[in-house]
Amino acid sequence: MEPSTTAPEIVLHQWSISPFCGKVRKVLAFKRLPYRIVEYGGLKALRAAKLAPTGKLPVVDYGGERLSDSTAIARFLESRHSSPSLAAPAEIAPLAHLLEDWADESLYWFQIWARVCDDAALDRTVAIACEGCPSWERALFKVGMARYRRNLVAQGLGRRPDADVEAELFAHLAALEVRLRATPWIAGSVPTMADVAVSAQLDEMIRTSRFADAIGGHRAVAAWLERADFEGARKGRFESASVALAS
C-alpha cells in the first residue's frame, strides 16, 4: 500500500516486547508510513537510556526530529499524517481518551504481571526479547526482567493474591466483550488511539502469557483484535498461541 502522505525517513528505536513500541508500530502501519526499526534486544536495551531524557523506548527519529513517549509520538504522527485518521470524533473523544489512558496506566500493569509473575511466561518473554543472543546474555536479561516484580509490589498488583489479580483481569475482559458486542471499535464506530493502546497491551499478553486462550475465548474481543492488527502480523494468533507457549 502507498504511504498516506509523503514523509521523511522514520526510524523506530524499539524493544520488541514493549506494548508501547507496539502502539507506535500500529499507528505507523495504520497510516501506511514506511519506517525502519532499530532493535534493542537483550543487553542492548541498556543503550536506550541515552536516546532520550526519559531513558525509555520507544523513540522515533522523524527526519531531523527525535520524539519519545508513545502517546506523544502517536499525537505527532496524527498531526503530520491526518489521513487515515485515528483522531476520535468529538462525540466519542472523551471516552477514547479515558480508554487510552486506562490501557497505558492500568492494563499495562496487568500485562506486566501476566509476564513476570509466571515462570513460563517470563521465559517466553526473554526468548523473544533475546532472540539470537547467547545463553549468558539471556540469563542476565532475565534477572533484569525480574525487577518488574518489585515494580508491581510498589504499584500495588504485586501485593495482591494472584487469584484476585486474575479475577480482576477477567472482569476487564468481560467488560471489553460487552462493549465490543455493541460497537465495532472500542470507543465507537471508528478506530481511534484507544483501539491502538488497548490492543497493543493485549497483543503482548497473548504473545507470552497463559491468558491467550482466555482472551481468545471472548469472541467479540478476539474479532476486534483481528481488526486492530494493523500490522497484519498476528493473524491466526489464537490458534497458535497455545503451541507457542508450550514450545
Image (cartoon, rainbow, N blue to C red):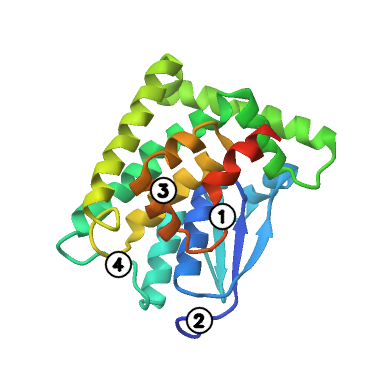
Of the image marks 3 and 2, the number of the one nearer the N terminus? 2
User: Badge 1 is on which residue?
Assistant: 52
Seen at 45% across and 64% down, the residue is: 27
Q: Amino acid at mark 4?
A: Ala
Of the image marks 3 and 4, the number of the one nearer the N terminus? 4
Q: CA distance from mark 1 to mark 2?
A: 27 Å
Residue 239 lies, with reference to residue 162, above or below; the image says: below
The image's mark for residue 21 is none
* Element under disc 3: helix
Seen at 45% across and 56% down, the residue is: 226
User: Badge 3 is on which residue?
Assistant: 222
Q: CA distance from mark 1 to mark 4?
A: 26 Å
Q: Amino acid at mark 3?
A: Ala
User: Badge 2 is on which residue?
Assistant: 3
Side (left or right) of 24 relative to 179: right
Q: Which of the 4 image quarters holds residue 140?
A: top right
Q: Amino acid at mark 1?
A: Ala
Return the residue nearer the eye: 105 or 200: 200
* Element under disc 4: loop
Return the residue nearer the eye: 203 or 44: 203
Of the image marks 3 and 1, the number of the one nearer the N terminus? 1
In the rendered image, is residue 125 in sight?
A: no
Q: CA distance from mark 3 to mark 4?
A: 23 Å
